Structure formats: C-alpha cells, structure tokens
Image: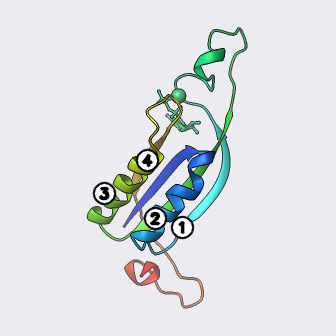
C-alpha cells in the first residue's frame, strides 16, 4: 500500500478531483492547508520583500492505493492536471503505508481499502 499526498493550488481543486474520480481511486481525503516551498511563499511579483516567510493557502489531497502501479498512475494524473508551469504548482509525496483499518469491520490491509 502507498499513500500519495499532493499539495496543489486552490484553484486546481475541482480539476484534480474530477481527474481522480475518473481513474476510480478508492477514497480521497482533502484538506485546506497553508504552506510554502523554496520561494518561501512569495509569488514572483512580490519576491524580494524583506519579510521572513509567507504561507500561501493550498489544497492537500491524500489518496491511499494498493499497488505501485496505482501510485504511479495517481501521481501522473495529479501532476498533469495541477501543472501550470509556474512556481507554486505544488508537490507530490509518496510513502509506503504500514497499515490500514476499516473501522466498521476491523478489516486490515488491502481488504480495508478495496
Ligand atoms: N519540502 C517540503 N516539505 C513539505 N511541504 C512542502 C515542501 N515543498 C513544498 N511543500 C508544500 O507544497 C506547496 C507548494 O510548493 P511549491 O510548489 O511552491 O514548491 P517549490 O519547491 O517552491 O517549487 P516551485 O519552484 O515550483 O514553486 C507548499 O506551499 C507546501 O505546502
Ligand atoms: Mg515555490
């Protein structure tokens, strides 16, 4: 099992959600988050100001999938839909997932996510 965590621009939320829906992922968690990358949150037109750090609102998607192939597919779909070619487009982090539990039934692992 793998967890794909993607931080994207707020205005890409609908597009990414629709694209994930098309590849039939088993579940999605979405959060509104604040963050910054290498530019410390400054858009290019205000870069160079003296303030220390600036967090920008972003959307975080979390998707747990069963296989590496699904993780690759999910990453691919997100990076294509969320890309504008500008700084701040976001990042995708993928981790191996130790365990999953469906609380209603107590099922674990793949049985919990399928
Ligand atoms: N190393 C990191 N650790 C945790 N979160 C990060 C990291 N880098 C980026 N993020 C998250 O991703 C969001 C978008 O990052 P961003 O796209 O600006 O990355 P970047 O490395 O600065 O690339 P770019 O040059 O395209 O802007 C940030 O607001 C933050 O929430
Ligand atoms: Mg950046």
Q: Determine the residue positioned at 68% across, 51% down.
A: 32
Residue matched to label 1: 28
Q: Secondary structure at mark 1?
A: loop
Estimate the x, y position of residue 44 in percent, counting from the top left.
Answer: 58, 19
Of labels 3 and 4, earlier in sequence is 3
Of labels 4 and 1, earlier in sequence is 1
Observer-side mark, 2 or 4, equals 2
Observer-side mark, 3 or 4, equals 3
**Disc 4 residue: CB within 8 Å of ligand 1:** yes
Estimate the x, y position of residue 73 in percent, counting from the top left.
Answer: 32, 60
Q: Secondary structure at mark 2?
A: helix
Q: How many marks?
A: 4
Q: Determine the residue positioned at 39% across, 69% down.
A: 23
C-alpha separation, residue under disc 1 versus residue under disc 2: 9 Å
Estimate the x, y position of residue 40 in percent, counting from the top left.
Answer: 60, 23
C-alpha separation, residue under disc 3 versus residue under disc 4: 11 Å
Of labels 2 and 4, earlier in sequence is 2
Q: Which mark is residue 20?
A: 2
**Image marks 2 and 3: residues in contact by CB distance under 8 Å:** no
Q: Secondary structure at mark 3?
A: helix
C-alpha separation, residue under disc 3 versus residue under disc 1: 16 Å
Residue matched to label 3: 72
- On the rendered image, what quadrant is the N terminus found in? bottom left
Observer-side mark, 1 or 2, equals 2
Task: Report crowding for label 4: few under 14, some 14 to 19, many 20 or more residues within 10 A (C-alpha).
Answer: few
What is the quadrant of residue 50 in the picture? top right
Q: Nearer the viewer, residue 65 or 11?
A: 11
Q: Which mark is residue 93?
A: 4
C-alpha separation, residue under disc 2 versus residue under disc 3: 13 Å
C-alpha separation, residue under disc 4 versus residue under disc 1: 15 Å
**Image marks 1 and 2: residues in contact by CB distance under 8 Å:** yes
Residue extending furthest toward the left: 69
């Amino acid at each position: 099992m793998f967890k794909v965590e993607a931080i994207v621009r707020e205005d890409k939320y609908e597009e990414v959600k629709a694209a994930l829906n098309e590849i039939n992922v088993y579940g999605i968690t979405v959060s509104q988050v604040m963050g910054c990358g290498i530019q410390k949150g400054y858009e290019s037109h205000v870069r160079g100001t003296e303030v220390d750090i600036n967090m920008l609102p972003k959307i975080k998607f979390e998707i747990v999938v069963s296989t590496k192939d699904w993780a690759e597919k999910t990453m691919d779909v997100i990076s294509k839909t969320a890309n504008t070619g500008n700084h701040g487009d976001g990042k995708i982090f993928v981790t191996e997932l130790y365990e999953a539990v469906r609380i209603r039934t107590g099922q674990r692992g793949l049985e919990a996510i399928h």
